[in-house]
Amino acid sequence: MEFDLESRAFRSDLSGDRLAGKVALITGAASGVGECTAKLFDEHGAKVIVVNIDGELGQVVSEAISPANSRYVHCDVSKEEHVKNVVDIAVTTYGELGIMFNNAGVIDPFKESITDNNKIDFDCVLSVNVTGVFL
């Protein structure tokens, strides 16, 4: 498997139907690793729920990979009701949910000094990167 920078997608020599019939929910799927994973799963036949907090980017990814086999759903993974909703949508839309790829993540904004850190930024990182995976 190799990563193609131009298309921002993984390419492999494996069969194109390895995930046929599977339903995958991918958080943080609007860019980076999540976007590449969504595209790869689509290439291998999965139905993909593109989950992201940024609706514009999420919709673009969903439409780019295969509108017939994907759906964008807005979700803040740090909010339990959002996560429950996206799981319910996956099951309602496709009848099941076989794969959850918890990829959403944030980093604390760069600070010149450690004394410039604040609890609000720290809480945001924990709520997305820890609580979001738990939910």
Image (cartoon, grey):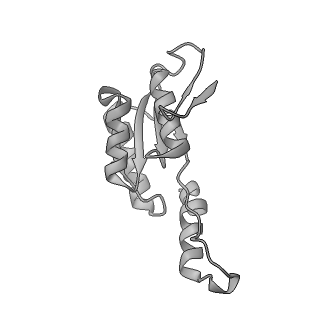
**Which of 110 and 100 lies nearest the eye of the viewer?**
110
The extreme bottom residue here reads: 115
Question: What's the residue at 60%, 68% (across, down)?
Answer: 126
User: x, y percentage for residue 88?
Assistant: 37, 45
Q: How many discs mark residues in the rendered view?
A: 0
Residue 47: quadrant of the picture = top left
Q: In the rendered view of the protein, which quadrant contains the N terminus? A: top right
Relative vertical location of residue 110 with respect to residue 24 in this rendering, above or below:
below
Relative vertical location of residue 49 with respect to residue 18 in this rendering, above or below:
below
Question: What's the residue at 54%, 34% (across, down)?
Answer: 5
Relative vertical location of residue 16 with respect to residue 63 in this rendering, above or below:
above
User: x, y percentage for residue 73?
Assistant: 34, 47
The extreme front residue here reads: 6
Residue 129: quadrant of the picture = bottom right
Question: What's the residue at 47%, 46% (across, down)?
Answer: 31
Question: What's the residue at 55%, 76% (across, down)?
Answer: 121
User: x, y percentage for residue 16?
Assistant: 51, 15
Residue 12: quadrant of the picture = top right
